[in-house]
Image: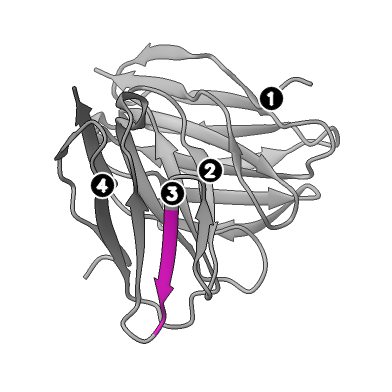
Amino acid sequence: RKEVEQDPGPFNVPEGATVAFNCTYSNSASQSFFWYRQDCRKEPKLLMSVYSSGNEDGRFTAQLNRASQYISLLIRDSKLSDSATYLCVVNGKAAGNKLTFGGGTRVLVKP
Amino acid sequence: DAGVTQSPTHLIKTRGQHVTLRCSPISGHKSVSWYQQVLGQGPQFIFQYYEKEERGRGNFPDRFSARQFPNYSSELNVNALLLGDSALYLCASSLWTGELFFGEGSRLTVL
């Protein structure tokens, strides 16, 4: 079983719609969680950290469910510019930055 | 401020050759991490260096090595290249923990 698993998609989303997808992780001792965004042939960039209480940043909402070991990302009012691959990232260490990336979920927003 | 810079951006090697990739972190960041991203997959952790010492190593063969210099820049070396080493090699800088800032990567093709 992979340490971090994601549905590769693609999720084809009409502009203005809401899309949500999950990521599961295998290490119950994982300490911190993130969503990164990667555009085609570009480097990953941090979208948001994921906190136990859930957090929201504009149109983006992230949730963490430690009991079921998954995190989720919801995008509201999708824009064409939201088209990208969304990488789920888990840090299993108490210190240091050994991040484990999922394979990514591809989202395509269409007019 | 300059972001993370990597060189070269693209390179082509043949099987059995050696390659050196270079990375300069963001000013003030003392940690450099290296990731390998094969097409269609998420980045895989190779190494983390902090204050010139190796602080983490991923599941890569001994053909992969790295070092960090007193100015916190870093080199990733890969010996005896295989076709499967073809990938985007990403360098990321950070504080000891926290957000990773990625460079644009070095795209290696092994023929």
Query: Residue B42 or B67: which is nearer the viewer?
Result: B42
**Mark 1 residue type:** Gly
**Mark 2 residue type:** Leu
Depth check, mark 1 against mark 4: the one in front is 4
Task: Identify the residue at horizontal 61%, vertical 25% (top origin).
Answer: B22
Query: Crowding at label 3, few (<14), some or many (≥20) Cα neighbours within 10 Å?
Result: some
Tag 4 residue: A18
Label for residue B3? 1
Depth check, mark 2 against mark 3: the one in front is 3
The secondary element bearing badge 2 is classed as strand
Depth check, mark 3 against mark 1: the one in front is 3
Decide whether residue A64 is among the magenta residues.
yes
Q: Is residue A63 depicted above or below B23 in this figure? A: below
Query: Residue A6 or B66: which is nearer the viewer?
Result: A6
CA–CA distance between discs 4 and 3?
10 Å
Residue B58 showing in the rendered view: no
- C-beta proximity under 8 Å, tags 4 and 2: no
**Chain to which mark 1 belongs:** B
- C-beta proximity under 8 Å, tags 3 and 1: no
Tag 2 residue: A46
Tell me residue B2's x, y (percent). Answer: 74, 20
Are callouts 2 and 3 both on one chain?
A: yes
Q: Which residues are magenta?
A: A61-66
Label for residue B22? none
Are callouts 3 and 1 both on one chain?
A: no
